[in-house]
């Protein structure tokens, strides 16, 4: 039997043709933060291995983490973590079948953004006060 | 849909794979999302309590059975979750079939390598090696 190739199917338009909206930005941010956390697990693993390797390796790791660049990475990592976490909560709400109305979607986008910024700052204030 | 073959849509997909486990990844991603929610908060708490501690005190905390068990659960949950998440991203954006297979494999290796290194470190601290 002759194999007939399926006809080329139309593809949906991609990101660049849409006007930016908050819900779209939060959705993209969820993927970006997820990917950053993915790469960042290397740092967590390295930090744990350094701790297991002995005081010298751990001191080096702590020195790197405490440097200006280290703190910046830690801050961004914690923000990505909280943002992805709240974005995930938003998805869990959607999984129940709720929150699809325009106003509810907007509220969830606001919740993700405002919540993640304030929670990240709160965590750093607590961490710096406890030190 | 333009039909360029005489075969029916059902005939063309039959035998190409099972549709019985399609929700497996979806459900596992939700399960680990919920466990990550709890474990990440605990992990942040552990990291905050570790900051500023001298080495012996920090290691005593990390090696505490309860802390170690929670860290191991966090590592497992996070690695499973991030593997599925990255696979979804790869399936969406990598269109070349061979490269897609390679990146999917690399993704799994990465998740396992990161998980194994972290688990090894936590166990070593916990068992006092």
Image: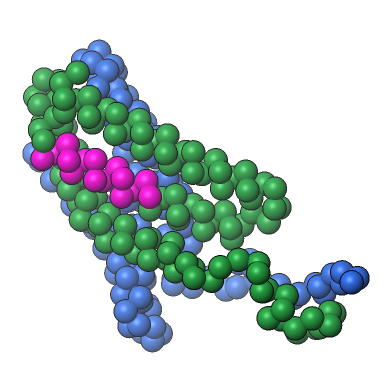
Left or right: residue A24 compared with residue A93: right
Left or right: residue A123 compared with residue B118: left
Q: Nearer the viewer, residue A91 or A13?
A: A91
* Chain letter for the part of the structure drawn in blue: A
Instruction: Give me the residue at 91% from left, 70% from top.
Output: A2
The quarter of the image holding the C terminus of chain A is top left
Is B79 situated above or below A54? below
The colour of chain B is green
Residue B61 percent coordinates (x, y): 10, 31
Is B119 situated above or below A91? above
Q: Magenta stretch: residue A43 in it?
A: no
Q: Nearer the viewer, residue A90 or A122?
A: A90
The quarter of the image holding the N terminus of chain A is bottom right
Viewer can see residue A21? yes
Left or right: residue B78 compared with residue B64: right
Q: Nearer the viewer, residue A122 or B42?
A: B42
Residue A10 percent coordinates (x, y): 74, 75
Instruction: Kindly indicate the quadrant of the structure image that contains residue A53.
Output: top left
Instruction: Kindly indicate the quadrant of the structure image that contains residue B11.
Output: bottom right
Viewer can see residue A112? no
By secondary structure, the bulk of the magenta-drawn segment is best described as helix
Magenta-highlighted residues? B66-80
Instruction: Give me the residue at 43% from left, 41% from top.
Output: B111
Instruction: Give me the residue at 64% from left, 54% from top.
Output: B94
Residue B129 percent coordinates (x, y): 19, 18
Residue A65 percent coordinates (x, y): 29, 29
């Amino acid at each position: 039997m002759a194999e007939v190739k399926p006809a080329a199917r139309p593809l949906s338009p991609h990101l660049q043709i849409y006007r930016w909206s908050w819900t779209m930005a939060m959705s993209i941010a969820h993927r970006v933060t997820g990917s950053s956390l993915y790469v960042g697990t290397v740092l967590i693993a390295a930090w744990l291995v350094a701790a297991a390797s002995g005081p010298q390796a751990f001191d080096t790791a702590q020195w790197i983490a405490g440097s200006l660049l280290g703190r910046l990475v830690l801050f961004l990592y914690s923000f990505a973590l909280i943002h992805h976490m709240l974005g995930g909560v938003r998805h869990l709400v959607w999984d129940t079948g709720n929150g699809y109305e325009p106003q509810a979607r907007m509220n969830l986008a606001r919740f993700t953004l405002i919540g993640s910024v304030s929670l990240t700052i709160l965590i750093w204030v607590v961490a710096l006060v406890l030190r | 849909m333009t039909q360029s073959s005489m075969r029916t849509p059902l005939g063309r997909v039959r035998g190409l794979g099972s549709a019985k486990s399609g929700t497996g990844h979806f459900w596992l991603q939700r399960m680990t999302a919920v466990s990550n929610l709890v474990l990440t908060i605990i992990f942040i708490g552990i990291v905050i309590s570790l900051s500023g501690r001298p080495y012996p005190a920090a290691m005593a905390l990390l090696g505490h059975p309860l802390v170690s068990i929670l860290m191991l659960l966090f590592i497992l949950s996070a690695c499973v979750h991030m593997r599925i998440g990255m696979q979804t991203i790869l399936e969406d954006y990598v269109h070349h079939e061979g490269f897609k297979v390679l990146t999917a494999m690399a993704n799994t290796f990465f998740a396992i390598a990161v998980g194994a290194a972290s688990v090894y470190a936590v166990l070593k601290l916990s068992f006092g090696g």
